[in-house]
Image (spheres, coloured by chain):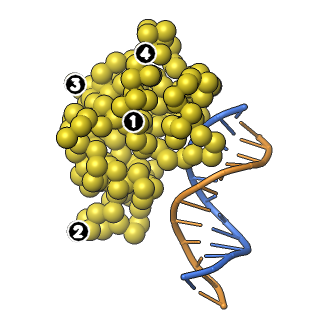
Chain colours: A yellow, B orange, C blue
Amino acid sequence: MAKRYWLFKSEPDTFSIDDLQRAPKGVAVWDGVRNYQARNMLRDIIKVGDEVFFYHSRVQPPGIAGICRVVREGFPDKSALELSSQYYDPKVHSDKPVWYAVEVQFVLKLPKIIPLEVLKKTPGLQKMMVTRKGNRLSIQPVTSEEWKIIMVLMKNYR
DNA sequence: GCCAACGTTGGC
DNA sequence: GCCAACGTTGGC
């Protein structure tokens, strides 16, 4: 099976690449995803070893902040059951999970974010979800071609 | 902080 | 099952 690549969005005020780097062993649960399309990818498609661009949204500038790797495949997102969690979902019961999480491990942090504006201008990246207007999906597939292009771009940001 | 774009909800 | 209303995302 060919290796898969992804882009995960996070608001750094909630969870940033620095938070991931500081976590024990650089490992953290990627939870709180409450969108069915993203859920399906977390539950069914994303596998251990897949590589992920860590994207910071709702900051200036938004863009790719680093890389992480999937170390645990889809499992029920417990935050949906926790009343105190901002991700609590009253329609979820423990015997029938609705939402799923994965675990990721820190790989690298870029000294400088690769801004969305640069991604938009880079040939070969115009079809990426993240560069398209109005896209809100927080878990996005990235093609191996796009991954390669961004890895080359990255040399200017480290 | 604004607001366009999108996903979800719920009345019918 | 349609679709208007609503809530959320996220760039700007």
Towards the viewer: C3 or A75: C3
Query: Are dots 1 and 4 on a single chain?
Result: yes
Sequence-first disc among 4 and 3: 3
Residue identifier under label 3 = A25
Dot label at residue A95: 2
CA gap, disc 3 and disc 1: 28 Å
Please tell me which residue is depicted at 40% across the width and 41% down the height of the picture.
A141
Would residue A35 appear left or right of A119 to someone viewing this image? Answer: left
Residue at the disc numbered 1: A143
Tell me the element at label 1.
loop
Q: Nearer the viewer, mark 2 or mark 4?
A: 4
Q: Amino acid at mark 2?
A: Asp
Residue name at image x 49 percent, y 47 percent: A137
Q: Are marks 3 and 2 in contact (CB under 8 Å)?
A: no
Q: Give the crowd class for mark 4: few <14, some 14-19, many >=20 residues within 10 Å.
A: few
Are there few (<14), some (14-19), or many (20+) residues within 10 Å of tag 2?
few
Instruction: Identify which amino acid the numbered label 4 is placed on.
Output: Val
Residue at mark 2 shares a chain with residue at mark 4: yes
- Residue A138: image location, x then y, percent: 47, 44
Say which of marks 1 and 2 sits in front.
1
